[in-house]
Image (cartoon, rainbow, N blue to C red):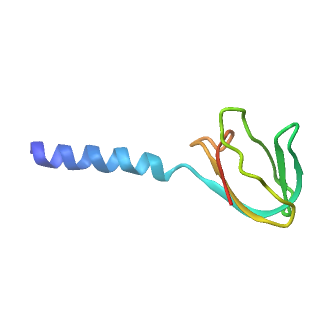
């Protein structure tokens, strides 16, 4: 029984990380001063100061990582 509970608990813990989402797309606009990235699909994302921001270029494909609620940027990958 303990083995079953440990397995179930670890699966529940790992599935929480899977809930985090991302948005992939091509950069249409980028404002380094305000740290806002706008993708060609029209979605805009403000990157918090505590998140590393690579040198993003217009026309480049990026992946914007979001938290579980989908309301905060957690990563920007090129």
Q: What residue is at 69 percent from the left and 40 percent from the top?
A: 71
Q: What residue is at 10 percent from the left and 42 percent from the top?
A: 2
Q: Nearer the viewer, residue 74 or 4?
A: 74
- Image quadrant where one finds the N terminus: top left
Percent from the top left, x then y, of residue 6? 19, 44
Q: What residue is at 59 percent from the left and 53 percent from the top?
A: 21
Drawn side of residue 39 relative to residue 54, left or right? right
In the orientation shown, which residue stands out farthest toward the left?
1
Q: What residue is at 72 percent from the left and 32 percent from the top?
A: 49
Percent from the top left, x then y, of residue 60? 79, 65
Relative to 67, is 54 above or below? below
Numbered disc total? 0
In the orientation shown, which residue stands out farthest toward the front?
55
Drawn side of residue 24 relative to residue 37, left or right? left
Percent from the top left, x then y, of residue 66? 63, 46
Drawn side of residue 8 relative to residue 45, left or right? left
Q: Nearer the viewer, residue 25 or 4?
A: 25
Relative to 40, is 35 above or below? above
Percent from the top left, x then y, of residue 65? 63, 50
Relative to 31, is 50 above or below? above
- Image quadrant where one finds the C terminus: bottom right
């Amino acid at each position: 029984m303990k083995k079953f509970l440990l397995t179930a608990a670890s699966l529940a813990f790992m599935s929480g990380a899977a809930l985090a989402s991302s948005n992939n797309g091509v950069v249409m606009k980028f404002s380094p001063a305000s740290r806002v990235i706008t993708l060609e699909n029209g979605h805009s994302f403000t990157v918090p100061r505590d998140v590393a921001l690579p040198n993003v270029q217009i026309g480049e494909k990026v992946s914007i990582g979001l938290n579980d609620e989908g309301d905060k940027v957690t990563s920007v990958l090129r």
